[in-house]
Amino acid sequence: MTATQSFYHNSSPPGRTGIMSWLLTHDHKRLGIMYFGAVCFWFVLAMFLGLLLRTELMTQGRTIMGAEAYNATFTLHGVIMIFLFVIPGIPAIFGNFFLPIQLGTDDVFFPRLNLFSWYLFMFGGLFAIISLFVGDGFPDTGWTFYVPFSVQNSANVGLTVTAAFILGMSSMLTGLNFVTTFHRMRDKSMGLMQIPLFTWSLYATAWVQILATPVISITFILILLERFFSIGLFDPDKGGDPLLYQHLFWMYSHPAVYVMILPGMGVISEIIPVFSRKSIFGYKAIVWSSMAIAIAGSLVWAHHMFTSGMSDVSVFVFSLLTYLVAIPSAVKVFSWVSTLYKGSIEMTPPLLLSLIFIYLFSIGGLTGLVLGAAGTNIHVHDTQFVVAHFHFVMFGGTGFAFFAAMHFWWPKMFGVMYRFKPAYIGAVLTGVGFVFHYVPMLILGMQGMPRRYYDYLPQYETGNFLAGFGGYLLIIGMVTMFVNLLLSFKQRIPAPVDPWGGTTLEWTVPSPPPVHNFMNKPHVEDYPYDFTKVTERFQKTGK
Amino acid sequence: MSSQVDRAGIKLGMWLFLYSEIILFGGLFVLYAAYLHRYPEFFAEGGKELNRVIGAVNTIVLLISSFTVAASITAIQRNAKKQAVGLLLFSLFCGVVFLVNKYFEWGAKIHHDIYPNSETLVAGEPGVNIFFGLYYVITGLHGLHVIIGMALLSVSLIFVLNGKVTASRFSMLDNSGLYWHLVDLIWIFVFPLFYLVL
């Protein structure tokens, strides 16, 4: 592979050098790497903010910060994690890098729009940073910006909401780009049922991004207008209804959680078959369940509002619809487990992380049913139970899928292998820390400790202390993982074309890929998860 | 990158974008529906205060401009550059007429102390306040889209003049035209919802 030069050596469009070859690039791979840097920065920042929150809660009363700082910190943690890590994370990094390669093409359909999305992302982040330091500081409304608080609040809600608006645009344009690429750039010989599952999941995600994001845009515009002009659309004194804000907000923000989880599911669907050396169980079922989640997930928003005041009929309908979403999600879990069954399993860090994903995501899904049922919801609504459920799905789910994707595609993206042992240690520590961190929160919630509270009654101290302890374990695990990956740049162990025995197209091109991805016309297999050739190769060469 | 321009792909991307614009207004129409259900009589009362003649004129102006934009795309495909430029200029003129009408309409309302958070509205019936609140938000956002559409058409016009948009390469003009039709389409819904309500 010495004859080919990777995309790190050649710029697209050609002829640009130095920093400009990055800042003005059209190359989806370079943009993926640039997103990687930005997203990781935000993730690490918000992770430490989260740790500060749990440290504050470890003992009763004031521990390290005051009540107002606490409110602003959890808002900042939420806003960063949602808008700058979980939503863009997998699609913008791994989607940008691998969607065109998996489709057998050389770039996304609108490369310049892709660059523009990256700039929107950076500007959105910049706005968020600015809103920290000017005026009355960061908002303390929580990431949901509920009215009337967000309208009357003196803090920098306007600037933060603008930041979220810009980030929404970025995410929507990325989705638009992916859908167009999927339809127009796919290799001519690749039929719909020959597309790798990761790309399918990105396709479903992209539709949700296009469908749902404008609703949050208009909601944020309305907050801004209310702040400047006091129209009163959500103000009961002036004839408005604050509940309508909640409806508008969740009409986007519930589908948005599927924007967060679907790509993660796609990652797991790639990793499990590779290390089971076995075709994925229920390929079509997984494809259809992705689309089903995207559709059904858009119809369940009001289950966030069971206690806000709704008719019993609405509660019943939204509860039922919520249960329906569990079906396609369970289809996926069962498909992954069935793929492992009687497979020839090879343990690697990405597989271990995927297994942890399945475990944590299942708990997240099941606790979701507790919340989706109208009766039990009343009991645990707005308690730490909700926080734990949400983190089981978003962090145990998407977060671990993100780590798994990092370990799976790292060799392809950077052309270097990392050491396995520290990766295992990091993964186990993160997993154990995670359970220690969030299981106490589930219990605290059932006992009645509310979310977003700065202080609590004495009976909650043990649980909160344990959760904080778990938080530290969690962080140590993640730091181990990240440091191990970074050390791979120092060790420089070159990665082969196909270190894992994968079957999708990205494993047929050099690591890292050349600027146009494919040197010869890609050969599309009849079925993307046929491991016959891989096992033959293993039997012949022993690796 | 393939050397051939995939016009269908570019259009697909544009349609997806237009779709997102419709959803953007959709959020406001949801609010409209919910409040119309709550305050039907006040919406009727508010609707009677709007000037139907100006509204109707604006509808016709936008419809005509939509036609001339479409005609300019056909003209450029037939290599009739001068015709295309003329039609585009006329469309832009229609856009200006629309905005001028809007300016006088809003101006008259503001003169009668009807604007967000004005004393008349705050002291009056809540339903009327909501009606005019939505009126200003929706027509304001629509007006902003008119301005964006005019900017796109102006850029296309410049491209036609300096030969960047030609009979074989007219996606820019085509997509600007689509955007202009969207602006028109939204107005077709806004007009009856506010001016002709009950």
Image (cartoon, rainbow, N blue to C red):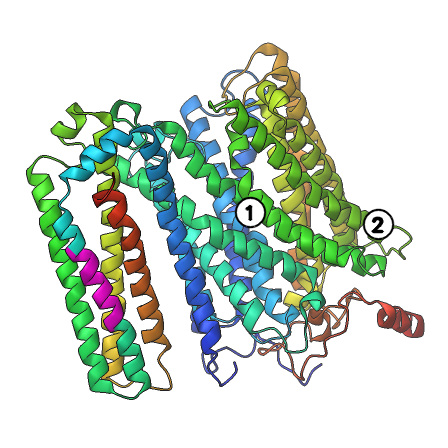
Name the amino acid, label 1: Val
Is A129 placed left or right of A405 in the picture?
left
Quadrant occupied by the C terminus of chain A: bottom right
| Residues beneath discs 1 and 2 located on the same chain | yes
**How many C-alpha atoms fall within 10 Å of the one at disc 1: few (<14), some, or many (≥20)?**
many
**Disc 1 on helix, strand or loop?**
helix
Where is residue A111 drawn, in percent x and y? Answer: 47, 71
Magenta part of the chain: B57-68
Q: Residues within 10 Å of mark 2 (few under 14, many from 20)?
A: some
Which mark, by number, is residue A338? 2
State the image coordinates of residue B84 (x, y, percent, origin top left). 23, 81
Total number of numbered discs in the rendering: 2
Residue B39 versus residue B182 in the image, above or below:
above
Chain containing mark 2: A
Please tell me which residue is depicted at 28% across the width and 54% down the height of the picture: B188
Report x, y in % for residue A140: 40, 30
On residue B185, the disc is none
Residue A351 visible in the picture: yes
- The tag earlier along the polypeptide, 1 or 2, is 1
Residue lying farthest to the bottom in this orientation:
B79
Q: CA distance from mark 1 to mark 2?
A: 28 Å
Amino acid on which disc 2 is placed:
Ser
Q: Chain of mark 1?
A: A
Q: Which residue is mark 1?
A: A86
Decide if residue A95 is on the left or right side of residue A415. left
**Secondary structure found at label 2:** helix
